[in-house]
Amino acid sequence: MSEQSAVVNDLLRAWGQGNLQARDELLSLVYGELRKRAARYLRDERHASTLQPTALVHEAFIRLAGGKRIGLKSRGQFFAMAAQIMRHILVDHARARSAQKRPNAALRMTLDEQAQATHQRDCELLLLDQALDDLSRRDARQSQIVELRYFGGLSEYEIAEALGLSRATVTREWRTARAWLYRRVTRGATANS
């Protein structure tokens, strides 16, 4: 275990015991890494999203810190929870944007290319979210691995550490889940067009 992981684990335990200063120190320690992970996810859709990495990280930490105490015990668990929260924020954001784009029957709206791209990206994210929900009913562990990899930006090694699995198991489950999701999403996209 790295020195930083040990410090994060200690801060999580202290926060779990009600030490709010530990929460603040934890944020300072992991902020840069959380922001890099959020930026990595948002990089491909910067033109299509009004959500920025800083806003995503701040919102995730606000939701994570909503309760005064936290029951996470390790760095891996922390980043797993952060990935899950970021997924929910992104999906909520996409739903809100999608709802704004539904024109009233009496209102005519023209769409430029950027608006179409944004709407398409929001629809893809919502479709992926639904597919992940379906996958979680089929195989909760595979769904969690996808969430950590795709939304959290965790490496296979980090996922293995967070979930207490071998790296080989994570690699195998990631490949299987990706193939299942690809089939599910492309089938769903075809049905929705």
Image: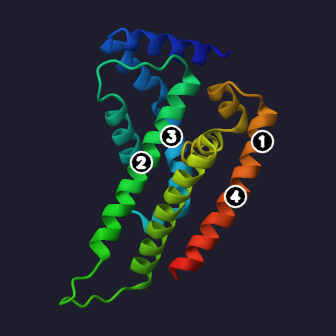
For the residues labelled 1 and 4, the Cα–Cα distance comes to 14 Å
Disc 1: which residue: 171
For the residues labelled 2 and 1, the Cα–Cα distance comes to 24 Å
Q: CB under 8 Å between callouts 2 and 3?
A: no
Disc 2: which residue: 88
Q: Residue furthest right?
A: 168
Q: CB under 8 Å between callouts 1 and 4?
A: no
Q: Secondary structure at mark 1?
A: helix
Q: Label 4 amino acid?
A: Trp
Q: Residue furthest front?
A: 138
Q: CB under 8 Å between callouts 4 and 3?
A: no
Q: CB under 8 Å between callouts 2 and 1?
A: no
Among numbered discs 2 and 1, the one appearing first in the sequence? 2
Disc 4: which residue: 180
For the residues labelled 2 and 3, the Cα–Cα distance comes to 9 Å
**Is residue 122 shown left or right of residue 191?**
left
Q: Label 3 amino acid?
A: Ala
Disc 3: which residue: 83
Q: Residue at x 45, y 16 (%)?
A: 12
Q: Label 2 amino acid?
A: His
**Is residue 168 shown left or right of residue 27?**
right
From the viewer's side, name the closer residue of 41 and 17.
17
Q: Label 1 amino acid?
A: Thr
Q: Secondary structure at mark 3?
A: helix
What numbered label is drawn on residue 15? none
Among numbered discs 3 and 1, the one appearing first in the sequence? 3
**Location of residue 135 in the rendering, given as x and y in whole percent from the top left corner:** 60, 51
